[in-house]
Amino acid sequence: MYGYSALIKNTKNKKMNYTQSIKTKTTQRTSFLSIATGIDKWWGKVDNPVSKVNDEFSIFFGNTEWRFKIIEFLEYEKITWKCIKANHIHQGLQNIKEEWFNSELFWEFKTLKEFTEISFLHSGLNPELNCYDVCESAWSFFITKSLKDYLDKGVGNPYFE
């Protein structure tokens, strides 16, 4: 597996795939657990928390469902999700149902003095996709606002119907 660090160093990948990073005052452990077991606190409704390689979970946004398999789980350092099922429905967008299928989402966690840095790469989410503008905007909100608020203030703003 390539991991986030190897992909992000490749400038072609950096330009072609969605990336985001935040710094938080929470510990690296707490930050990691928010991605492994606290997804419902900042992103949306999920069916399972994850704790090891090969665990799976789905996240739901109305009729949209993405199912992910954990393909890398290095406790408190890295977690990688692979989209194994995509049923993306968004009013006004055509041909997006399976655009996330087989994409990989890399999360890395590093302690930097008094902060933890969380780096994110959604490999496969690029400007060529019909859903890119909507997904880019959503990821920006969920990572830089909802996840950050959850970690720094204890309350995120996940999607729930």
Image (cartoon, rainbow, N blue to C red):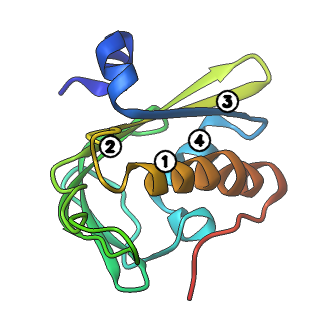
Q: Is residue 116 above or below residue 37?
A: above
Secondary structure state at the residue bearing disc 2: loop
Name the residue rendered at 79%, 61% in the picture: 154
Q: Position of residue 78 (x, y in %)?
A: 40, 34
Q: Is residue 46 above or below residue 156?
A: below
Q: CA distance from mark 2 to mark 4?
A: 27 Å
Amino acid found under the numbered disc labelled 4: Arg
| Residue in view at x 42 percent, y 39 percent | 75
Quadrant containing the C terminus in the rendered view: bottom right
The residues tagged by marks 3 and 1 sit, at their Cα atoms, a distance apart of 23 Å
Of labels 3 and 1, earlier in sequence is 3
Disc ID at residue 136? 1
The label on residue 125 is 2
| Residue pointed to by mark 4 | 29
- Mark 1 residue crowding within 10 angstroms, few (<14) / some (14–19) / many (20+): some
Q: Give left or right: position of 104 versus 31.
A: left
